[in-house]
Image (cartoon, rainbow, N blue to C red):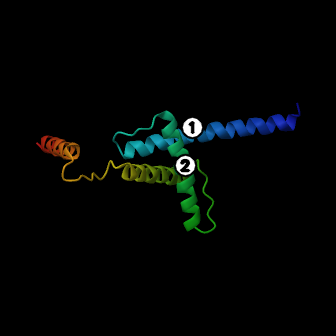
Amino acid sequence: MDAQFMEAVRAAVNEFLMWVGFGTIVGLTAKALMPGRDPGGAIGTMLMGIVGCVIGCGTVMYFREGAKVEPISVIGFCAATGGAFLLLLFYRILAGSFFLEAESGDRWAHATRRRRRRRAILNET
């Protein structure tokens, strides 16, 4: 094998592992900022962190002309966490865990709403 090819493969694997680790840390941080039940496991958290990094760093670079944001830096970590947080927020809004719509005969929605109110009242006292 060519030494230059092996060096390129090593660099690509190193870059992949760096994104996996960084994405997992960012995804866990975003989930810690917005606690609650999420249907994503370890893979979902990692992918949310990676996509959040792309969204967050891309947004910062778009609004700051001439700025180059490295993902693994303080500003990159903050931007990535913000992007993953927004991704999680939009997921929850679209999945219906923030807003509950019910029709007049829907007993499940009303029972769920009553349970949430009871828990809130018990937690206040």
Dot label at residue 33:
none
In the image, residue 68 sits, relative to residue 51, either above or below, namely below
The crowd level at tag 1 (other Cα within 10 Å; few <14, some 14-19, many 20+) is: some
Three-letter code for the amino acid on which mark 1 is drawn: Gly
Specify the farthest residue to the right.
2
**The C terminus, quarter of image:** top left
Where residue 50 appears, as percent x and y from the top left, is 55, 45
Give the tally of numbered discs. 2
Residue sitting at x 49%, y 53%: 83
Observer-nearest of 85 and 74: 85
Residue sitting at x 33%, y 41%: 36
In the image, residue 42 sits, relative to residue 121, either above or below, namely above
**The N terminus, quarter of image:** top right
Specify the farthest residue to the top.
1
Where residue 86 appears, as percent x and y from the top left, is 44, 54
Where residue 92 appears, as percent x and y from the top left, is 38, 49
Q: Nearer the viewer, mark 2 or mark 1?
A: 2
Specify the farthest residue to the front.
105
In the image, residue 10 sits, relative to residue 101, either above or below, namely above
Observer-nearest of 120 and 95: 95
Look at the numbered disc 1 and give the secondary structure of its residue.
helix
The crowd level at tag 2 (other Cα within 10 Å; few <14, some 14-19, many 20+) is: some
Look at the numbered disc 2 and give the secondary structure of its residue.
helix
Residue that badge 1 annotates: 21
Residue that badge 2 annotates: 51
Residue sitting at x 46%, y 53%: 82
Q: Is residue 80 left or right of residue 108?
A: right
- Which of marks 1 and 2 precedes in the sequence? 1
Three-letter code for the amino acid on which mark 2 is drawn: Val
Observer-nearest of 9 and 78: 9
In the image, residue 40 sits, relative to residue 79, either above or below, namely above
